Image (tube, rainbow, N blue to C red):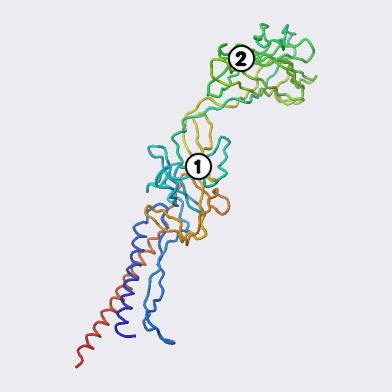
Amino acid sequence: MSLYGAIMTGISGLNAQSQALSVTSANIANVNTIGYKDGENQFATLVTGQPGPGDIAGAGVIAITGQNVAQQGLLQTTTTSTNLGLSGNGMFIVDQQPGDTSNLYYTRAGDFTPDANGNLVNSSGFYLMGWQLDANGNIPADRSDLTNINLSNLDGKAEATTNITLAANLQSSTPANSYSPPDPSNTTATPSTAMPDFQRTINVYDSQGGSQPVTVSYYKGTQPNTWNYEISYQGAPGNLDSNRSAVLSAGTVTFDSNGNMTSVASSYPAASSPTTGTISFTIPFTGGGTGLSDQTINLNMGTPNSSTGLSQFDSASTLTSSNVDGALFGSLSSVSVDKDGYVVANFSNGLSQKVYKVPVATFDNPDGLSAISGNAYSASVDSGTPVVQEANTGGAGQIQSDSLETSTVDLATEFTNLITTQRAYSASARIVTTADQMLQSLEQLQ
């Protein structure tokens, strides 16, 4: 190796160690950056000449740097429900402008919070993308149909009642009642004027979140172990279609000699076979003053030939329990994200609704992604094409709500690298100065 070759080798060392210092500096600067993946230095020989066997003449050095994108960082708990961390493979899909899906980027920085317009955005200005669910909670068939996750339209939610479960005892020694069931041909029947032997009003919920009173009345029948029932609407008459009956259903309930209910059969507005303990009735809102559509509700009075639901024992008639599904209107109280990536809206009335699902993009070679400003990445030839899939499936990681992935930088390692890099840089500089002194000595030869 010539003296000039030695100088070039020293210069290559200076360049390589300068680049290594740059990587180490970036790591230290980003020790607290959410989701940051530490850079790594690798060194390789750089041959600048044509050495012979066993000759290392002209052997310099080159620094090869990259980020350990696939490395898992520790997940740290936060108090913000829209902060997201990934445990396992994959990246969150983001864009830089809401509504613009032409340029998608990928990040592990999940410090998402709603902006003034309700879009989930992280501190670097990247907007979280997801699948908007349909009314049945299904994601789009086209997995590339992504949209910005926006929470501004989650104003509130109500749920109409579809099922009532009732348990009560009807006193067996009650005298027979003079109740007469309504004529099935009378479409505008009014509730019976006979005094019921037992009666309870149950509030059900309509589709707009309002409360509607429905009364269930029982009358002791003239036949042994038989009771008549009548269900009627007790709200304002103008709420119903004037051409429809305020009596919603009427029929009979039978019991065995042990006091267990054996059947419930409807006789109004249409007859039904007494095969179960459940009957259906419809509140005729259509055409009334509420703007509601007809609402059909199932009333479960128990399982035939069992001790659940209605019973007939010689003790005071009483309601044991009742359960009504549905809910009054409730405002949005919180938003959470489950491990499968579902964005769930929680309401003050106890209801919840899945509104979006956060996808996860995986790559064949995540370390080959191209880094951009804001701790995000773009796909490259080296990384391969992203595969967009649901969290916790197909090798994609699990999403952790109320969590953030911390930087993978280890300060102890980086400070050690600083020392070794500084020493190596000084040594390379000494090569240059030593070769220069030798050249000066050569020039002084007479």
Residue 346 in the image: x percent, y percent? 50, 34
**Residue ID for mark 1:** 337
Residue 196 in the image: x percent, y percent? 67, 10
Mark 2: few/some/many CA within 10 Å (<14, 14-19, 20+) = many
Residue 42 in the image: x percent, y percent? 41, 69
- Asked where in the image residue 187 lies, by quadrant, the reply is top right
Q: Relative to 326, is 417 above or below?
A: below
Residue 5 in the image: x percent, y percent? 32, 82
Residue 283 appears left or right of 102: right
**What residue sits 39% from the left and 37% below the top?**
117
Secondary structure found at label 2: strand
Number of numbered markers = 2
Image quarter (top left, top right, bottom left or bottom right) of the N terminus: bottom left
**What residue sits 39% from the left and 76% below the top?**
46
Q: Nearer the viewer, residue 197 or 253?
A: 253
Question: Between disc 1 and disc 2, whose residue precedes?
Answer: 2
Q: Relative to 329, is 339 above or below?
A: below
- Disc 1 residue type (three-letter): Val
Q: Nearer the viewer, residue 7 or 255?
A: 7
Residue 209 appears left or right of 13: right
**What residue sits 31% from the left and 73% below the top?**
14
Secondary structure found at label 1: strand
- Disc 2 residue type (three-letter): Tyr
How far is mark 1 from mark 2, CA to CA? Answer: 41 Å
**Residue ID for mark 2:** 233
Mark 1: few/some/many CA within 10 Å (<14, 14-19, 20+) = many
